[in-house]
Amino acid sequence: MGVMDGMKPVAAMVVVQFVFAGVNIFYKLAVSDGMDMRVLVAYRFLFASAVLSPIAYFVERKKRTKVTWRVLLLSFVCGLCGGSLAQNLYISGMKLTSATFASAMTNLIPAITFVLAVLFRYERLAIRTLAGQAKVTGTMLGVGGAMLLTFYKGAQVTPWPPTHINLAARHQHEEHASSSLHPDSGNRAMGCLLCTGSCFFYALWLILQARLSREYPFHYSTTALMCAMSALQSAAFALCFDRDLIQWRLSSGVRLLAVLYTGVVASGVMLVVLSWCVKRRGPLFASVFNPMMLVVVAVLSSLLLGEELHLGSVLGAVLIVTGLYSVLWGKGREAAENEPAKAHASGTELPHIDIVVHRHDPPPTPQQQSTEPGPAR
């Protein structure tokens, strides 16, 4: 039973990365359809808050405590860091550089999260211990594998026959026209800075989410509050740059599907799962799964968008999985080492029974009672 409980966060984070990989596919389809990405981000959190708010109300209404101003402030900051800022900085950096470069930069998240988690004392560096060395080595392997997957192409090694499916092919002329409006000459440094800022704020959100889960341990309510804050912030940001009502119309099926998937499934459901994993295993545990998304995106792009798999993708995937296993092993060993101390601190150690033997004189026999002198008269 203990092994199964330990595997639940791992399985949950794998599902989260598969769903987030689908977000990248729908992002590409929405951009190919000419949709403004700032509007898509705003719709994403609007739909997520609309779905999560009634669920949070009915599921947690009997056990939910009063929402304090401190919880509201933490929710606002979480929505700002993990929602509006992280997403809008990412898409702005992607426009100034390229989608490949921006995707590569997101793999800095595990390293940044590790540094922040050590600074905020959510993780122990413990570099002299085997568990600490495994966590540091695994984080570096994951980042290195993601960079290799992105920047090294190599020979074509697609293991399956071509599917001849390219969902974005009919809109490629619009995508090229849109990308030509954003030349990266002279703007690459600013794009790199924006992408790095996106990674930093996402990593900071993982740290703040761990704090919010401790302050207010109701996952549906905290996620609904965060999505509502992100929706307001993202809508205000999008309206500042694009007030054309045509961009806000969900006329085509691609735009509607992209909004429903990213809002309801990715932000509505998966953010609840992600918050639960952060509370159970910490922010570093949640961040080390992030490079795994690139592997899933590479496979989905080969199957659905007509792209080819290359040797760099395979080698990068091997490094990512190896690094992930190393971090999970280090976390498991660290948890096993800390279990006796936690049990002693919480008073849950095994109960013990003290047996005390007292020696008493045996009861007197009838003959002894008859020979005893009676009371004085």
Image: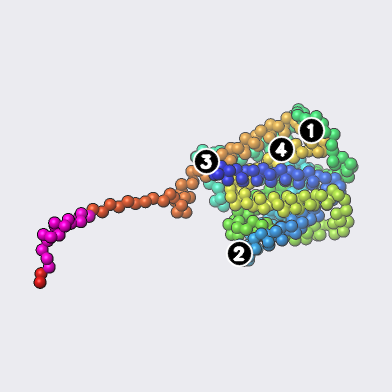
Q: What SS does tag 2 mark?
A: loop
Q: Give the alpha-carbon distance from disc 4 to disc 1, as whole Å.
A: 13 Å
Which residue range is magenta in the image? Answer: 360-375
Residue 286 vs 213, above or below: the answer is above
Q: Which mark is residue 333?
A: 3
The earlier-in-sequence mark between 3 and 4 is 4
Pointers 3 and 1 in contact (C-beta within 8 Å): no
Q: Give the alpha-carbon distance from disc 2 to disc 1, as whole Å.
A: 52 Å
- Is residue 368 one of those drawn in magenta? yes
- Is residue 30 one of those drawn in magenta? no
Residue under the image location 49 percent in, 46 percent down: 338
Q: Give the alpha-carbon distance from disc 4 to disc 2, as whole Å.
A: 41 Å
Q: Nearer the viewer, mark 3 or mark 1?
A: 3
According to the image, label 1 marks what residue? Answer: 308
For residue 213, side relative to residue 368 (left or right)? right
Nearest the eye: 230 or 345: 345
**Residues packed near mark 3 inside 10 Å, few (<14), some (14 to 19) or many (20 plus):** some
